[in-house]
Amino acid sequence: MSQKHQKSQARSISVNAIAEKPLLIWDYVAFAAIAVFCFLVFQQSDLLHTAGCSYGYLNGHFRDFYDYCGTFDIHPAYMPSFYLIFAIWNIPMRLFGVVTFPTENLPVLAILWAKLLPCLIYVASGVLIYHIAILAGMGSKKSKLCAYACLTMPVAFYAQFIFGQYDIIMTFCVLLGVYYYLKKKDIWFIFWFAIAMTFKYSALLIFAPLLLYREKNVWKIIASCVLLMVPFVLEFFVYRNSPVFQAYVFGFGGNAVSSPTGYIMNAGYYTGFELSTFHYEVSFAVLAFGTLCAWCYFNKPTDDRNFVNTIFYICCLAFFVLFGLSKWHPQWLLFAVPFWVISSFLHKDTKIFMILDLIFMLVYTIFNVQMIPNNVDQAMFNNGILRSLVNGNIGTELMMEDLIAKLDKSLCLSILTMMMLVYAVFKHPKYCAQNPAQEVNCMGWMRTRFIGGVAIFVVPAFVCLMAYFKAPYAGYKVENVYSQVQLCELGDEVSQTFCATGNSIDKIRFVAGVNDRVNKGYVKLTVKDSDDKILYEQDWETSGWLEDRIITANLNGVPTTPGEYYTAVFEVTQANGDYAVSIYRSEDNVTGDKKEIAEADGKKQSYQLEMIVYQ
């Protein structure tokens, strides 16, 4: 055999190690290219907070970590594990002086470096999923397809390379736990779930039913649960006396029901129990999860084939409880993806789930850009490598919800919840293939699902970016302020004077507050020139206003003279019952123009209203 032929054969073997037809090496190239592009261009702000906090450890503050970070007005909200792993990873940034203290205002280099860690773990999870699929009996070729399908599922890809989340660290630990669960190495199963619990408590929702499905001895169940809690308790013990730890880690600085730890109590039904004005409801999530755990305990595993199918069915049911019966954040769904996809590849009809995944991404994106505008949408350009092009703020001239938010939010949520239920119920072992290695013919849909799914977000995001560079442009611009001026009674008004920078006003966007109530009444916006001539008026029925949401007035080219001053007046024209709307404002003068002032009750104020005037 010639040396050239030997090299060609070796190259073929190395390619087959990661790709077997219909999965091609070019599929990995496409994945890598799109992943790198999104990695560089987009990033949500959560990572900046968590990675920024980790520098407290790098400044030597171990015992007083939470309180030390609090002195910089940045408050860690997780158990120490997230911050410790990011601290180790961020050592080069600290050594070279890129970041020297806890802060959310990270430079792009520090953001990308921090983002690289969870992205590498995400790729490593693909390798782990491949080995789990092998244990599930899929065989080499199908296991590679399954791993690739997990990595390219649009919801997961969005969460990792666009949103830039770090839930993958906990997810990776859970996958290791499941891997050892399948290998029947229970001590390692418990160990990796115990580590996962120190990142996020949601790992418990997978651990408990899996433990109960295999183990029927009550004392062993108790012992396993005690071992599970050891790392968590040790971390808690170290920081138990920290005021910041107590205030922010258990409840995230808010009341328990409105915080992530209390989401499981949000959906329920009232049976009549009450004290004073407080009604006590039965939580759907607690009810369903308890029933699932009982089902796992009272059912005994049979043959190995049915056992594998059943545990992934159980996990999918648990994820329906976690995400279908309680509130979730967009990035959290990545946790469910490996289990949704592996169970799809155990199913008789894998192709239909590839199609459903694409539909899921469409509805998921439409829902998110409406629920969390100017945060998980085009705003993620603000933390990527293009941030300098938009001066760190792409603004709101055109938002993704303006382009694609064509479905009612309740309908979107209903569709997503229904699909999660489908992902669970129809993964029952009776729907699984008799032979888990049975060949699947869905590569075309996998590619469509990946490319199309990513495009659902990326294309409208770039349309919004292009709008930033076209007229109309933001003239007066005050954003991201948190104080409010309240308008409570008929005739209450507040105004903002601004300088025109163009020949016309296209739109005015402002931010309203509703003060935890439905405000039945009307607010009128009037735009006047310096001679009090009315140029534009619009009334809003305020019962539909939501807290901290952008309201748009489309002026469609009201003529202005550059350099002249104009005034936007917000006035309550009808107020019924307990009425209190707010307009957000700054604490002082943000624009630097002393004539751009606000007035309330006929008196000049030191603050400015949060408002953008597009001209």
Image: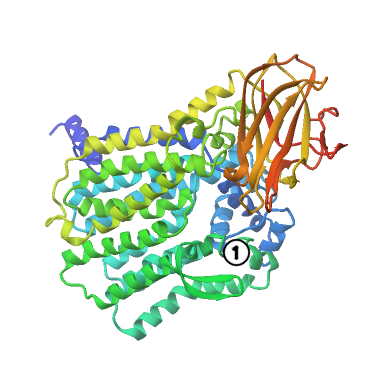
Label 1 residue SS:
loop
Asked if residue 564 lies left or right of residue 265, the reply is right
Judge by depth and name the residue closer to the eye, 549 or 304.
549
Q: Is residue 535 above or below residue 354?
A: above
Q: Is residue 604 visible?
A: yes
Q: Residue at 74%, 41% (x, y): give it.
A: 585
Q: Is residue 114 left or right of residue 61?
A: left
In the displayed structure, 201 sits above or below 155; it is below
**Image spot of residue 134 (x, y percent):** 22, 55
Residue that mark 1 sits on: 249
| Amino acid type, residue under disc 1 in the picture | Val
Q: Where's the N terminus, which quadrant?
A: top left
Q: Nearer the viewer, residue 156 or 287?
A: 287
- Residue 439: x, y in percent? 14, 46
Q: Residue at x 49, y 39 (%)?
A: 369
Asked if 261 appears above or below 458 in the picture, the reply is below
Question: Is residue 132 positioned above or below 279 on the image?
Answer: above
Left or right: where 418 falls relative to 121: left
Residue at the image position 63 percent from the left and 73 percent from the top: 240
Displayed quadrant of residue 534:
top right
The answer to which of 138 and 287 lies nearer the viewer is 287
Percent position (x, y) of residue 557?
63, 17
Q: Which quadrant of the view contains residue 311?
A: bottom left
